[in-house]
Amino acid sequence: MFAGPSVVDILAGQRSSGATLVLLPSGYVEAGDVETLRAIVDAANEISGDDVALPLYLSTSWLRPEHEQFLLAVIALSSHPVLVSFGSSTNPLDSKRKLAIYRRLVTGSGAFSWRTDLAGLDALAHGALGTAIGTGPGLRRFTPPKDKGKARRPDDPTPYVLNPGHMHWMKTGAMREELYVGAPAPTCGCRECGGQRIDRFTESQAAAASRHNHAIIDEYAQSLLSAAPSERPSLWRSMAQDALVAHEATSAVVGRPWNAPNDVSTFAGD
């Protein structure tokens, strides 16, 4: 038997690889397991270092009103920056209630919105410290240890792409087969696409699709950050409302209904 690496060794390995922020090892915490969550924060506080951050991998079921005040309190106990991520086999922020609690949690605790979807931009617009939005499904959430991730089109190997102006993630195979059937897909002017069609990415072009996704997310983020903090909530709401209008316009062009994602409708209605 060989002993596993110590926390000190894990952090040293990250630093030697060039990391400017090192992440403490942390486990998945089921909803309501307050003792484990407290123990993780207490153990992290024993580790020193200005470059250390504590990731919390939490069940999506923590996003209930009865848990909100405890989460705010336990995050406040951490001596390190906290990166909050919620796990589910599908979308962990799949309701208006969860989105509202998530926003209050990350803005009220000073935690970093991590491994999330466009809810990270919503949090950023409302005062969150920062956000890390994944360019692919596995980086926008994590799957709990005992679960298996679920995809809408598991047999479609094409990459997910963020449709510019629509705030809508969609596989390019689905774009070609379900959406842009009788009409050409729009072009994208981001730094990756340079005016090429949005549905062009194939299975072998996942890296390019990720660069496109990063470029679109960055455009949204820079628009928000260029505004005064007091103006960001209304600007974000306006951006989401524009995405709803874009869905209506696309529906008219392709001749079939295409609804905006539920989270975008929520952002637009605040």
Image (cartoon, rainbow, N blue to C red):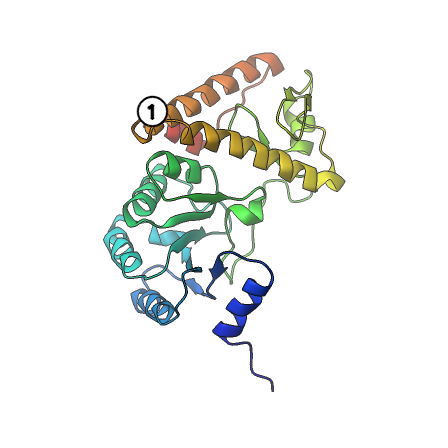
Q: Residue at x 35, y 50 (%)?
A: 111
User: Which quadrant of the rendered structure holds the C terminus?
Assistant: top left
Q: Residue at x 48, y 61 (%)?
A: 23
Q: Is residue 187 found left or right of 138 in the rendered image?
A: right
The one nearer the camera, 264 or 228, is 228
Callout 1: helix, strand or loop? Answer: helix
Q: Is residue 122 found left or right of 72 in the rendered image?
A: right
Residue 68 screen position, x and y as percent: 27, 51
Residue 158 seen: no
- 109 versus 189 height, above or below: below
Q: Is residue 184 found left or right of 256 in the rendered image?
A: right
Residue 121 seen: yes
Residue 80 screen position, x and y as percent: 36, 60
The one nearer the camera, 263 or 165, is 165
Which three-letter amino acid code belongs to the residue tagged 1?
A: Ser
Q: Which residue is mark 1?
A: 234
Q: Quarter of the image holding residue 207? A: top right
Residue 75 screen position, x and y as percent: 31, 57
- 15 versus 254 height, above or below: below
- 36 versus 164 height, above or below: below
Q: Residues within 10 Å of mark 1 (few under 14, many from 20)?
A: some
Q: Quarter of the image holding residue 209? A: top right
Q: Residue at x 30, y 65 (%)?
A: 34
Q: Residue at x 55, y 63 (%)?
A: 15
